[in-house]
Image (spheres, rainbow, N blue to C red):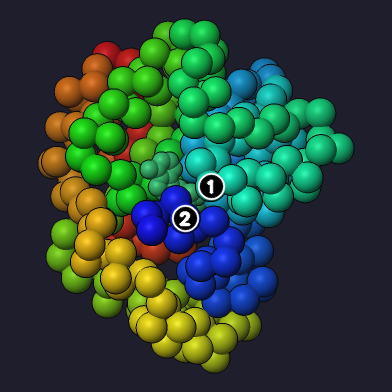
């Protein structure tokens, strides 16, 4: 079992119910949409998950490429967006094989924590190659080392209270606690970076990064970085 299979639906206890999932993806889609440059931008959302509001991002873009490693999630995305000519769904290998300079905007949101250090470095180099010279890469939801789990639990409860699923969030936290999440956390592990480490990683891959004022999504303990080609 690895993080990709954890996210491949059956084990996905990460959303406490459908309302949580949909509010989560709508919040993220609205935040991403604000970064889409005008003029028919070519956008890639890498590790997009179930992305039930991706049409919002596609609407503001020329084209949206959704990349998902988990096969069941990818199949559901393909079915969900079959009727949307502005959206295509790809595997990570297909995405890595795209021509250099294909994208105006690439987003990696809430994925870096599931990648090993070298895996992330390799992916950053791929994104550097795939971006157009004036393109923007967004590295979102970077989890700082201290108190990551309690902060995430508290942020989920608050998100639930604000969006009408507080008690479901309480139940969801209990389910996460008894799920494979903590087993995986202790065996495969999660990657944490503080601000300086994330900036250094992006610089090493050839980017000129800065920290965004707000993180994308609901958890403001986590960080988003905006990176352009150096
Ligand atoms: C928390 S979800 C993020 C989904 C979406 N981007 C969001 O912000 O809600 C984590 C995603 O990382 C993907 N993932 C985990 N490990 C991965 C890996 N080694 N390579 C590519 N994707 C991976 C999972 O398939 C899952 O879609």
Which residue occupies the extreme right position in the image? 83
Residue 177 at what x, y percent from top left? 36, 81
The residue lying toward the viewer, choosing from 61 and 184, is 184
Q: Residue 128 occupies which quadrant of the picture?
A: top left
In the image, the residue with mark 1 has its CB under 8 Å from the nearest atom of ligand 1? yes
**Residue at x 14%, y 41% (from the top left corner):** 197
**Residue at x 41%, y 77% (from the top left corner):** 179
Is 56 located above or below residue 101 in the figure? below
Q: Write down the residue under mark 1.
A: 70
Residue 199 at what x, y percent from top left? 20, 35
Which residue occupies the extreme front position in the image? 1
In the image, the residue with mark 2 has its CB under 8 Å from the nearest atom of ligand 1? no
**Residue at x 78%, y 45% (from the top left corner):** 79
Q: Write down the residue under mark 2.
A: 5
Give the quarter of the figure containing the C terminus.
top left
- Quick check: can you spot residue 80? yes
Mark 2 or 1, nearer chain start:
2
The tag on residue 107 is: none
Asked whether, in this view, residue 81 is left or right of residue 98, the answer is right
Under circle 1, the secondary element is loop
Badge 1: few (under 14), some or many (20 or more) residues near its Cα, within 10 Å?
many
Under circle 2, the secondary element is helix
| Contact? badges 2 and 1 (CB < 8 Å) | yes
């Amino acid at each position: 079992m690895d993080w990709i299979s954890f996210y491949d639906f059956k084990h996905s206890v990460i959303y406490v119910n459908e309302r949580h999932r949909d509010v989560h993806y709508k919040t993220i889609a609205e935040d991403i949409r604000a970064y889409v440059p005008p003029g028919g931008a070519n956008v890639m959302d890498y590790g997009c998950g179930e992305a039930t509001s991706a049409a919002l991002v596609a609407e503001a873009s020329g084209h949206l490429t959704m990349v998902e490693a988990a096969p069941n999630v990818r199949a559901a995305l393909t079915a969900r967006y079959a009727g949307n000519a502005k959206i295509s769904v790809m595997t990570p290998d297909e995405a890595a094989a795209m021509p250099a300079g294909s994208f105006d905007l690439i987003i990696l949101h809430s994925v870096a924590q599931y990648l090993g250090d070298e895996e992330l470095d390799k992916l950053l180099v791929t994104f550097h190659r795939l971006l157009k010279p004036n393109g923007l890469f967004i590295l979102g939801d970077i989890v700082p080392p201290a108190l990551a789990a309690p902060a995430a639990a508290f942020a989920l409860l608050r998100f639930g209270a604000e969006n009408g699923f507080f008690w479901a969030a309480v139940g969801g936290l209990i389910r996460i606690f008894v799920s494979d999440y903590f087993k995986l956390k202790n065996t495969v592990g999660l990657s944490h970076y503080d601000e300086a480490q994330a900036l250094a990683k992006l610089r090493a891959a050839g980017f000129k990064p800065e920290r965004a004022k707000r993180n994308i999504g609901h958890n403001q303990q986590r960080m988003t970085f905006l990176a352009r080609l150096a």
